[in-house]
Image (tube, rainbow, N blue to C red):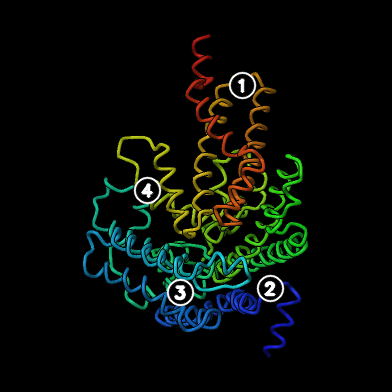
Amino acid sequence: MELDMETMAASIGVSVPVLRFLLCFVATIPVSFLWRLVPGRLAKHVYSAFSGALLSYLSFGFSSNLHFLVPMLLGYASMVLYRPKCGIITFFLGFGYLICCHVYYMSGDAWKQGGIDATGALMVLTLKVISCAMNYNDGLLKEEELREAQKKYQLIKLPSLIEYFGYCLCCGSHFAGPIYEMKDYLEWTEGKGIWAYSDKGPSPYGATLCALVQAAFCMALHLYLVPYHPLSWFTDPIYQEWGFWKKLSYQYMSGFTMRWKYYFIWSISETAIIISGLGFSGWTESSPPKPKWDRAKIIDILGFELAKSSVLLPLVWNIQVSTWLRHYIYERLITKGKKPGFFQLLATQTVSAVWHGLYPGYIIFFVQSALMIAGSRVIYRWEQAIPTNMTLVKKAFVFMGFAYTLLVMNYSCVGFMVLSMHETLASYGSVYYIGTILPIALIVLGYIIPAKPARSKVRKEQ
């Protein structure tokens, strides 16, 4: 069996531990389907928790479940013992333990060398534990103190321990997401809310097939491209001999190649959540109405690759984590009565960087992301200030936003891929730090040349 595993792993260019994880990861699809056949609420919670723990054991070993228990029990204990501050307590304890695991395992190096451990799953689990505690904390607040997302997901009653474990480990969904809320999990399990079907409910099989085909395409394209764009070339003397445009195009192709690996992983996650039924998010307004599966949506591939503005990227990349960051970091840092600014953006990106790991490449990438988005907002404001009758000029600014996003995003993501400070700065320096200078220049120009809405000009003319 071990020999077969080695042969299979070699055939697709991965290590045996990674292959073992991939097999268990793909197994989340039939495991999620079988959830539909389990009778009774209690049995469903037990199945969710047990199947998730079993898949973790088969993927990472027994120690993985011990690691998962730590933030899970800390979060539940904080909800039981001190509800008024359980959200912030769980946030710091959960992130503290995750940081310790990041430092101890240094997973980024292991992933680059073909290894794998449970840290990636722990990252997803940490966000689920924190959101549950914060929503239980929100259950104490007055309605006028709550934002829309808080009103929607607040928990009035403490979930039972088996409900909590089922939510955290549900059918292996903690492997790579998507992140979902405790309230949605409970309503799905109990057949309430949008899952209170009068008949057999929406069929998930068409959407499941589409997600599977997408996953197969993404993996095939990644396996085809990766031999031509290895990360090792960034430190190769040959790369340093290339001209500016060739280096810039190689940065783009390296990022493009890497993204298809993530698209594959997330497509499998989407498939599992869709076939379980948890991914259902309502009906379209078309006639006849069609089911929507937005709760399962993690990535909009075309939306990301063809984004006209950097501001749109968090809305189409790792969608559920971006939503989590918006609801639990960005919005909660906004002072009531004031507009959000660069501080909220930078703080959110910093939390995202720490969540990914303490490698310099991650930190640099997410600081770059904050600058990139701020610069993109300047372009957007200028574009909005152009009168509607100047169509050609408006289109030129739209194209400028697209080109800016394409350049700065793929320049920035080199840090996310290579991780080390030396390689990141060497890569940025090889193209004269254009992806850092350009956003800063735009931010400064935004203050020098402030944009005034085109509508005010029209009113003055009238």
Coordinates of residue 118 in the picture (x, y in percent): 50, 73
Say whether disc 2 or disc 3 marks the residue closer to the N-terminus.
2
Say whether disc 4 or disc 1 marks the residue closer to the N-terminus.
4
Residue 237 left/right relative to 440: right
Q: Which residue is mark 3?
A: 169
Question: Disc 2 residue type?
Answer: Val
In the rendered structure, find residue 388 and report the number of the disc placed on it: 1
Residue 193 left/right relative to 338: right
Q: Which residue is mark 4?
A: 148
Label 1 element class: loop
Q: Which residue is mark 2?
A: 14
Question: Disc 1 residue type?
Answer: Thr
In the rendered structure, find residue 352 and report the number of the disc placed on it: none
Coordinates of residue 269 in the picture (x, y in percent): 58, 67
Say whether disc 4 or disc 3 marks the residue closer to the N-terminus.
4
User: Marks 2/3: CA distance?
Assistant: 26 Å
In the image, residue 196 above or below residue 448: below
